[in-house]
Amino acid sequence: MTNDSGAQPYSHPPIVEAVFEVRFASEVAPARLRKARDWLAGRYAVIQTHRPTEAKVDLTTRETMFTEKPIFYALQTADATEEIALRPASVAWIKRAPYDGWIGFRERFAQELPTVMKAISPAQITRLGLRYVNRIDVPFEGGLAHYEDYLTFRINHGEILEPTLAYQWLVVKEFTDQRLKSIVQSAVLEREVLGKGAFSFDIDIASEIEVPQKVDDILTKLEAMRALKNDIFNAGITARAKELYA
Amino acid sequence: MQPAPMFNRSLSTTSEKVKPANFLETLSSAKTYEPRTPKEYNFFSDGTYILEPALEQRPLEERLFVALAEAKVWTSRIAMHLDRETRDRLFRQLDVLHDAEEWGEGDRPVALDSYKSLVRAILFHRINRRPSLSLMPNGNLLALWTDGADYLTIEFLSRDQAKWLVQSTSLDGPERAAGTSPLQRLRAVLQTFCTERWCEGS
C-alpha cells in the first residue's frame, strides 16, 4: 500500500481503516487505564466512557444475573478519523479514511505508546496487530461488478457458480521465519456508492511469538509487519485496482 | 490448498467497521448448519450478553455525539471518492446542526440513511455547488439551493430516494414542481429546471 519511504503513493487510497493494536496478558487495573486516558486527553477532542454490563441469562430458571464489566474509553478527534480505544486488555490506535500515509500514522502511536505503556505498567504484551481494511469500489459493467479484474487472490469455483451474487474468504498463514502471522480476508460489501459494487481486501498482520515488550523494539517489529502487509497487498491486487485510486 | 479450519474472527486485530454484506439471513434454515456468531454482535453462546444503555436513555450530548460519530465514521467508507473540502464542509454543517445549546425538545439527530443519500447524490451527480443544510424534525436532511427568487430543496430520504421541490423562472413566469425520485434520476427529472445551475459551480 505504501512505498519504502512511507509516503502515501495513492491520491485516494482505498484504506477505510488502519488499526494498530497491542494486547495484554491480563486486564489492566481501572486506575491505570484511567491514568492513560487522562494523559492522552489533551490530544483528542472527544472522550467517550463505556460502562458495559454483562447479563447472564439462565433460560432454565428464567433468571438473569447482571455484572458490571470494566469501564473502557474511546478518545476521538472531532472528525472521527483518529481514535484510540483504551480497553482493559488491549489498546488500539485507529485511523479512518482519508488515510494520509504510514508516516503520520506511525508518528501517532510512536508518540502515544510510551505514554500508554508508562501509565499501565507493568503489563505483559501478548500480541501486536497491524490491520488494514481496504474497500475497492468497482463500476458495474453490463450489470456485473467484475471483482476478478481487481483482485488476484480469489476462489476458483469454476463456471457453475458464475456469476456469483457474493463471496467471502479468509486465509491464515504463518510466516515462521519472521515470527508473524497473516489473516487475509475478502468479501463482497454493502454498496455505498451508486452504480458501483464493492469488496474488501482486509490484511491483518500479527506478532504472537516472541512479542517485543519495549517501545523501540515494538516500533522495529511494526516496520517488519508493515512490509509484510505491503507485500501481501501488492501481490493481491491488480494494476487495474491500483489505477482506481492513483 | 486446504480450506481454513473453523476460525474465530475475534482473533484478528479489532476493526469491524467494514462488514461483509449480510447474505446469511437469506440462507435456508438447516439445523446442521449454524454459523459462528461473531463476538462483535455482543452475544456469546453461553447466554451471556454485554449491554450498554439504549441510546434514548443517554444524555442529550451523548446522543448527539453518537449520531455525529456514526455519520462521520460512515463517511470513512467512501472518503476516497470525496474531496477533502467537501467532506470538511459537510462535517462542519453537521456539527452546527447538532449544537446542543440550540437543540429543541423533540428534535431528532440526523438519520444516517438520509445523510448517506445526500452524500451518494453529491458523488453520483458530481454536485459541486454546495447547498445549505437543515435538519427536519424526523432527522432527515433538507438541502437548499437558491438563485435569486428561484430555489431547489431536496429532502434526502432513506433507501436512496429524494423528495424535491423546485421553483424556476422563465420568460413566461415562475414555475413550480415537486416530486419524489430515486437519487440516480434526480438530474434527469430536474433537467427542465436547468439542473446545471444547482449542480455546477462552487
Image (cartoon, coloured by chain):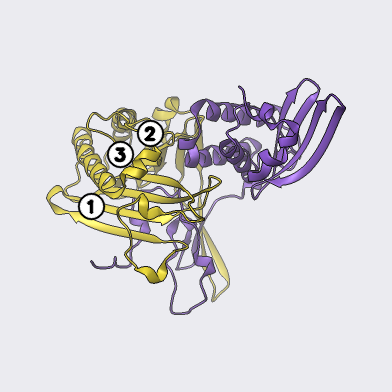
Query: How crowded is the residue under tag 3: few (<14 C-alpha within 10 Å), some, or many (20+)?
Result: many
Q: Disc 1, disc 2: CB below 8 Å? A: no
Q: Quadrant of the N terminus of chain A?
A: top left
Q: Quadrant of the C terminus of chain A?
A: top left
Indicate the position of residue B178 as horizontal and vertical percent values: 80, 40
Q: Colour of chain A?
A: yellow
Q: Colour of chain B?
A: purple
Task: Look at 42% across and 46% down and name the residue there.
Answer: A135
Q: Disc 2, disc 3: CB below 8 Å? A: no
Looking at the image, which is closer to me, B102 or A167?
Answer: A167
In the displayed orientation, state which residue is furthest to the left: A177
Could you tell which of marks 3 and 1 lies nearer the N-terminus? 3
In the displayed orientation, state which residue is furthest to the front: B171
Could you tell which of marks 1 and 2 lies nearer the N-terminus? 2
Task: Look at 34% across and 40% down and name the residue there.
Answer: A242
User: Which amino acid lies under the numbered mark 1 shown in the image of this protein?
Assistant: Lys
Residue B127, relative to residue A146: is it above or below? above
In this rendering, position of residue A196 left or right of residue B175: left
Q: Nearer the viewer, mark 3 or mark 1?
A: 3
Would you say residue B99 is visible in this rendering? no
Judging by the rendered image, the residue that carries numbered circle 1 is A181
Could you tell which of marks 2 and 3 lies nearer the N-terminus? 3
In the displayed orientation, state which residue is furthest to the right: B173
- What chain does badge 3 belong to? A
Judging by the rendered image, the residue that carries numbered circle 2 is A36
Residue A1 image label? 3
